[in-house]
């Protein structure tokens, strides 16, 4: 069912009301105000519960005609009261790299689940008679800031141990690792055969770094488990929140690049969220439209496929130029919620936003006939990053080869990124053409699905010099696939199949609506228009 689009502004109401906020609400036609509600904010001392600061904020929001989106955070370092950190119940993530604790509560700590449930219920019960003033709930489940992510970048620098790496070395994580593979493979003999190891029993099995991985298969499998563990933690939060707010929009906050160390799984999360009629808030907006197509629109591909909803955020605000790219990505993705921090501080952001604000409310039904394969196994194995996060010069992004390929191709034609999870769930039926990067890794079951798809008449293109391999290091070929190396030959083949392509790299990006109209974004002139 269609719901009106939400324009969400991030304002620190708890720091005191600012009169000028009202005019910004009116000018951008804001619907919602997000503010952080951390456990430490309501229970600084044990048993001393107070919502006074949030009560004042909600009163002002209601006065000026916007609804509230509380970002409920419990687990990250800055959300946990000092007295809990000092208690025996506290149990932190621990890294493999240094065998050192973080300041963030481990998702494998079962005792912390009771704390989380209590926190959610305290908030719900306090505001249950004012639910009409609440638009939606944003869930802050883990990570440095609240996303469904492992520690990576730090919050309040220097006050706790954090870095990009693998945070699965605490005692509860190790036990879960062993249980997972024992349940999956049943015997140590089967595990040894799969990984090329010689463990005597499961008590010897522990998570490892890539430099110590017994095989590529073992490393890829470990990252599958790592991602699944975060999804299980997110599902716990979603279940508990849905018990309390049965009809409200609820968003799972997700951020980060989808790398092995950060441990997100956006497409699997979309399927999980759809099960509970929950959406995803994706905080990955930055740089340019091509970046958005890789790191944010791909979340919407999964959300739309599983018939759920999503919201887009720029975690540290936009520029006057970038806000237009963000709006285009939001519109063509048919996302429900648009969040921005910069409205109060950057006049050029507000000016450009208002130019195209009316387009934000349309229901765009994007028609895409081409899919490009983004291999989960490849990212699980190749731990490098194509770019950097500008705030802290933090290595960021997918590995260089897929990042650069996806970026380059979007200049010339529209496509959806589809990964293993989506392919296993039948998404290839939506496309005429599947492009498989020639450098990637492919799981055996995905190979079989692709071969069946090709036999059924779908065009499959292996693009680039063919070094395709399975995770178990066997070469891969597709009898019915076209092998194409050059870009011009690729575009010619797509055109022959009825795909809209552009030879010239002119900075104008197009998206076709199912009505037959084309929406365009010109990154040189910072404009959005119908063609």
Image: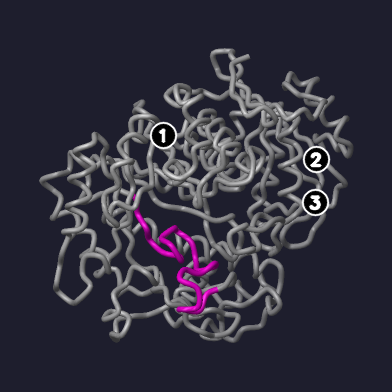
Q: Mark 2 points at which residue?
A: 462
Q: Distance between the residues labelled 3 and 1?
A: 35 Å
Characterize the local packing of mark 3: few (<14), some (14-19) or many (20 or more) Cα atoms within 10 angstroms. Answer: some
| Location of residue 223 (image quadrant) | bottom right
Name the side, left or right, on which 36 lies relative to 465. left
Residue 92 drawn above or below residue 280: below
| Coordinates of residue 334 in the picture (x, y in percent) | 48, 30
Magenta stretch: give its range. 138-162
Q: Can residue 458 be seen?
A: no
**What kind of element bears circle 2?**
strand
Q: Name the residue under label 1.
A: 336
Name the side, left or right, on which 515 lies relative to 129. right
Residue 317 drawn above or below residue 157: above
| Coordinates of residue 154 in the picture (x, y in percent) | 50, 69
Please give the count of numbered marks on the rendered protein.
3
Q: Mark 3 points at which residue?
A: 439
- State which tag comes first along the sequence, 3 or 2: 3
Q: Does the magenta stretch include residue 199?
A: no
Residue ID at (51%, 52%) = 316
Residue 316 drawn above or below residue 151: above
Q: How far apart are marks 3 and 2 (CA)?
A: 9 Å
The residue closer to the viewer here, 436 or 454, is 436
């Amino acid at each position: 069912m269609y719901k009106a689009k939400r324009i969400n502004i991030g304002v620190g109401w708890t720091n005191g009301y600012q009169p000028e906020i009202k005019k910004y609400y009116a000018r951008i036609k804001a619907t919602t105000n997000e503010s952080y509600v951390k456990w430490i904010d309501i229970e600084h001392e044990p048993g001393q519960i107070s919502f006074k600061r949030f009560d004042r904020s909600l009163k002002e929001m209601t006065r000026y005609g916007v609804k509230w989106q509380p970002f409920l955070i419990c687990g990250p370092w800055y959300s946990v009261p000092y007295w809990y950190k000092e208690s025996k119940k506290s149990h932190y993530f621990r890294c493999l790299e240094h065998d050192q604790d973080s300041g963030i509560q481990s998702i494998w700590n079962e005792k912390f689940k009771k704390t989380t449930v209590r926190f959610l219920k305290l908030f719900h019960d306090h505001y249950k008679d004012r639910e009409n003033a609440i638009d939606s709930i944003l869930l802050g489940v883990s990570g440095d800031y609240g996303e469904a992510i492992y520690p990576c970048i730090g919050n309040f620098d220097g006050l706790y141990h954090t870095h990009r790496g693998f945070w699965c070395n605490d005692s509860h994580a190790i036990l879960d690792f062993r249980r997972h593979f024992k349940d999956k493979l049943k015997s140590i003999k089967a595990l040894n055969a799969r990984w090329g190891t010689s463990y005597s029993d499961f008590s010897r099995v522990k998570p490892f770094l890539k430099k110590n991985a017994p095989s590529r298969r073992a490393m890829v499998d470990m990252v599958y488990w790592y991602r699944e563990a975060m999804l299980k933690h997110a599902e716990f939060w979603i279940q508990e929140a849905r018990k309390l707010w049965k009809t409200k929009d609820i968003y799972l906050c997700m951020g980060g690049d989808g790398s092995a160390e950060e441990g997100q799984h956006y497409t699997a999360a979309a399927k999980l969220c759809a099960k509970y009629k929950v959406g995803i808030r994706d905080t990955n907006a930055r740089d340019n439209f091509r970046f958005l197509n890789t790191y944010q629109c791909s979340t919407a591909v999964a959300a739309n496929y599983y018939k759920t909803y999503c919201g887009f955020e720029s975690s540290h605000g936009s520029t006057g130029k970038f806000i237009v790219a963000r709006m285009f990505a939001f519109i063509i993705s048919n996302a429900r919620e648009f969040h921005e921090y910069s409205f109060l501080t950057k006049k050029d952001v507000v000016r450009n936003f208002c130019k195209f604000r009316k387009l934000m409310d349309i229901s765009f039904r994007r028609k895409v006939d081409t899919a490009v394969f983004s291999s989960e196994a490849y990212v699980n194995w190749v731990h490098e990053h194509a770019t950097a996060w500008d705030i802290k010069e933090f290595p960021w992004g997918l590995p260089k080869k897929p990042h650069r390929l996806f970026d380059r191709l979007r200049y010339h034609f529209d496509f959806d990124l589809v990964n293993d999870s989506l392919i296993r769930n039948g998404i290839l039926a939506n496309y005429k053409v599947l492009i498989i990067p020639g450098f990637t890794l492919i799981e055996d079951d995905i190979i079989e699905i692709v071969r069946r798809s090709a036999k059924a008449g779908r065009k499959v293109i292996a693009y680039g010099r063919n070094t395709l391999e399975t995770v178990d290091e066997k070469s891969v070929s597709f009898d019915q696939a076209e092998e194409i190396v050059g870009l011009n030959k690729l575009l010619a083949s797509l055109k022959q199949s009825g795909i809209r392509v552009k030879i010239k790299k002119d900075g104008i990006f197009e998206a076709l609506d199912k009505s037959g109209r084309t929406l365009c974004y010109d990154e040189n002139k910072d404009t959005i228009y119908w063609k």
